[in-house]
Image (cartoon, grey):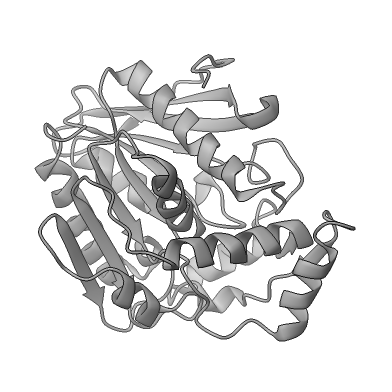
Amino acid sequence: MTQADNHSAAAAATPGSGSASAVRAEDGRTPGVGGLRLSWTWHRVAKPHATVLIHPGFADHRGRYRFAVDALTAAGHDVFIFDPRGHGDSGGQRGHVDRFEDYDDDLRTMIAVVTERTGAPPVLVGHSQGGLIVCHAARVAPLVVRAIGLSNPALTAAIAVPGWKIMMAKGLSQLLPTVPVPVGIPPEAISRDRDVVEAYRRDPMVFSAGTTRWGAEFLRAQADVLSAPTDFGVPTLVLVGTGDLVVSAETTLGHFRPAPGLEVERYSGFYHELFNEPPAERAQPLQRLCAFVEAHAKGGG
């Protein structure tokens, strides 16, 4: 798997806190499966304790993780975050994937890029579909990372997917794979913070439909992950909002049970985007994530 990338750096110094006196944002591009462009940003602190690689969710992009990036860099950690194929500034049709394994392979490419650039494996964090991708990729071969954090991984939907959508996705996946089908997630379901919801509504990079092929592949990936226990082989933290209206907290809590090396944290009434909840609430999972990263900054890999 190639680690080469067509790099274009744009450094911008911003005030930091804690052990990070300044944060520089460096943008770059890396070829994913089939040479498709993967766009990323490396938020760099002066003397990082660890590097965190964040995988966003579906219809999401790296620009929506400001609160998480700010918290992690303030705690003294570098943060890499990338747009998956078909998202944000990366290449590909919006909301489309030919096969779910393309997501898996792109993730491995980004892990290799981070490791090559920083000299050490990252702590990997996957949100929603990003969490599903982390779980699915790990089924094939271990992910070479220090530790793994999951934020409301999309193992099943909170509300049953209408039968017609399932039939449409599976029936047209081969004949008309790029036809978009509305996903049906209302913006107000992502967060209880009105400003976050309004910004989501106005964001030109956020979209509301996935293709028939994506739908079929997404359902297949969920079934694959749920068919057997998930064991990453590295320290794991699963963050779950019990008020999630997008993915099923019950399924996540049933699939990931606390055990040696596996921590599960519940946040009562929290919505889907734990790191984008109102300020007082989002501080809780962000502080927990920062502590987890710090605990595994020098181990694992």
Q: Is residue 162 visible?
A: yes
Residue 204 in the image: state x and y as whole percent.
70, 53
Residue 269 in the image: state x and y as whole percent.
32, 84
Q: Is residue 195 above or below residue 60?
A: below
- Residue visible at 36% across and 66% down? 274
Q: How many marks?
A: 0
The quarter in which the C terminus is drawn is top left
- Residue visible at 49% across and 65% down? 196
Q: Quadrant of residue 131?
A: bottom left
- Residue visible at 55% across and 15% down? 7
> Which of the pair 300/52 is nearer the observer?
300
> Which of the pair 138/84 is nearer the observer?
138
> Which of the pair 280/186 is nearer the observer?
186
- Residue visible at 27% across and 71% down? 281
Residue 212 in the image: state x and y as whole percent.
77, 62
Left or right side of 163 for 111: left
> Which of the pair 291/220 is nearer the observer?
220
Q: Quadrant of residue 293?
A: top left
Q: Is residue 260 above or below residue 161?
A: above
Left or right side of 192 for 253: left
Q: Is residue 207 visible?
A: no
Q: Is residue 10 above or below residue 94?
A: above
